[in-house]
Amino acid sequence: RRGVATAAQCVVLGVVLTPLAAHAAILQASDGASNDNFGSTVGQSGSTALVGAYFARVNDHPVQGTAYVFRNTDTATGPVTENVKLLASDGAASTLFGFSVSQSGNTGLVGADNTTVGANTGQGAAYVFRNLDTATGTVTQNLKLVASDGAASDFFGFAVSLSGSIGLVGAYNATAVTHEGGFNAGPGAAYVFRNLDTITSTDPATNPVTISQSVKLTASDGAAGDIFGRAVSQSGSTALVGAANAGVAGHVQQGAAYVFRNMDTATGTVTQNVKLIASDGAANDFFGLSVSLAGSTGLVGAYSATVAGNAGRGAAYLFRNLNTVTSTDPATNPLTVTEDVKLIASDGAANAFFGVAVSQSGNTGLVGASNATVAGQLGRGAAYLFFNLDTAAGTVSENVKLTASDGAPSELFGKAVALDGDHFSIGSQGATSSAAFAGKAYSGTISSMTTLDAGSASRVISGISFVSQDDWVVGKTTIANQVTLSKGDTANVTASGRGVYVGQNSGSSNNRLLAQGTVTAGAITVSAASGATDNTLEIASNGTTTAGTVTAYNGITVNPDGKVLLSGTSASSDRIGNSTPLKLAGGTLDLGGLSEGAAGTTGMGLLYVTAASTIDFGTTSGSNAVQFAGIGGHTVGQVLHITNWEPSGGATDQLFFSGVANQFVLAFAFADVSFNGTPGYHTTQFSGFYEVSGGGNSPAPEPSTMLLGGLTAAGLGMIRRRGSQPGVLTHPA
């Protein structure tokens, strides 16, 4: 089985482990233009993303709209453009094709809610596209969906959802009635279409098949203006439909959502099996503006809900067991249930609009907050991941917060979200990509930011930064997992009691965390347990002079068979925060052969040596200097090996330890240090080694080979006493 061989077995067998790559990408349209609203809607199926751009101009038709398919987001990195562009064969100006999108397997469903059908302006339509795994170029639909009783301004296609061969389309203004003031507003409806995988046309380009619904869905208590159908979700044979404007218990626009079962066999017009409301709902919450259904669990957003006195902070509500809750008389006495769990953002604020978009897969939820302020920038937006929703209770806050690394004000990151298994996409319709405000979307994987333990697996974080309330683990019990945090991305794991692990438990080996961006953590541990071997934290550049930066307030601990590797071209001060203790507990600090520059400018924080460990300079060139702000935790007899130190002969070739009085022991007993394997001195670089503190018999240094704390040989007697004077091991000019 993959991931069970030990490191020793891999050596014996000569196994070369090639991680299975799953990357992340920034998605954008190859022909994007300003104000296309690309990213206003997103769909996800495995590693394929579907993104709508409903304001896009097509063939000189303004606001006709398009949608774009992006395949293999698990191997793409950085900005990428689409594999396929989707259009309606009968598209026209102002049809808003792409206003809603959904994907299931290799089939896509796209809504165009302002499409004219017959003489009915704004009746709306939806379009089915098959074989998206092999399609190329620009394609038009296989099927067109319309409502058999459609009318002008129904806005059919405002929301769509696809599950297998069943499609669900919302028409939030359907069945319009005239009420006070003469305004035509319908309670809304939704329509179910079955067998979308088998209906075909011999000539879809010029004679596309148009079909009408199998079932029509309405709310038993629907009223004018409820906007039932403003949000829809389908999972198997169950449908969930939101009505964000519905009045509840006298509260206008509190909102509700409705569950419909047996959509695989239902016919005619049916009403709900279950009605969902928030237990703490209030007027103007707009509960039901977004909905998502996964199996028997529903997630409903209320983006305008007041939380902790903050109006518009927003919330989302989780409902379980929707496949078993029943009413004996749903037509006249529909069963109404309240949530099992309420979801909020831990850092939520007024008008953040948390819940404007929701998505669910398995026991994980993803919630967008498109108007959230990030780094002081209003409307930059955020998204929030929630885990273990099958057991959660009460009110819970997120496990991980996601933001766009390159975000800016009013980009609305999180306006659309889609989640399928490990993969997600997040839309940012106001972002600048190929053109100003053209919009873009961000793809990624959950495991890259939480626990990657698939074995021989690789993940790349690109374009997204995150704050985690959980541990970040690369390799829990398996081998050859790697996560790369790209340049410009940040990872924050500073929640109380949480940390970063590269090789967490016994059996985890050859795992790697590659930091090209910025990591800030409470603590980082490499090879955390006995039996965790050959794990590496690598702090590197990505081909530029700017390297990643790692700061751990409680230290980076490198246990036996673990390594911290500095690679790339920039100075060590760019790599490990100066306030971060580096604790060598039997592991290795590999400087990667860097030319580190002058002493005093490349501080690497506090060095603790608590077991026989190694500092490996790699193959150096030019001037080399490494300065530690202090050294402590040292025990006599625990050897620190200094290897591959090949200074050029200049005065700047220094291994520099500078400490703080009464806090750090600053040197080793004579036998405690070896240079390139020779205890106490390097035969060509040093003729002796001086003990600054600690017992033992050490030869006195020759004045030309050793400086201690900037003192000459005349001052040696002053610092032979125990103390915490700084020491410098210097190659003579």
Image (cartoon, rainbow, N blue to C red):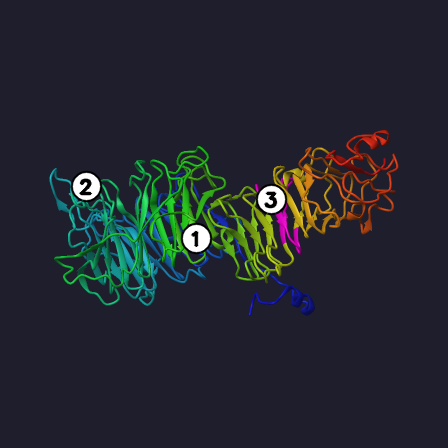
Label 1: how many residues lie within 10 Å, few (<14), some (14-19) or many (20+)? Answer: many
Name the residue beneath numbered marker 1: 424
Residue with the mark numbered 2: 252
- Compare marks 2 and 1 and give the one earlier in the sequence: 2
Tell me the magenta residue range: 536-563
Q: Closest to the observer: 527 or 621?
A: 527
- Across and down, in percent, residue 497 comes to 50, 47
Residue 269 as seen in the image, left or right of residue 422: left
> Mark 1 to mark 3: distance in Å?
32 Å
Q: Say which of marks 3 and 2 sits in front.
A: 3
**Spot occupied by residue 99 in the image (x, y as percentages of width and height):** 33, 48
Q: Please report the residue visible at 81 percent of the width from the left and 34 percent of the height from the top.
A: 707
Where disc 1 sits, the SS reads: strand
Percent x, y of residue 168: 28, 57
**Tag shown at residue 555:** 3
Q: Quadrant of the C terminus?
A: top right
Of helix, strand and loop, which one carries label 3? Answer: loop
Quarter of the picture holding the N terminus: bottom right
Secondary element at image label 2: loop
Q: Nearer the viewer, residue 193 or 258?
A: 258
Nearest to N terminus: mark 1 or mark 3: 1
Residue 166 vertical placement versus 251 (above, below): below
Q: Is residue 152 above or below residue 267?
A: above
Tag nearer the camera, 2 or 1:
2
Q: Mark 3 or mark 2, which has the lower sequence index?
A: 2
| Front-most of residues 586 and 453 | 586
Report the amino acid beneath label 2.
Answer: Val
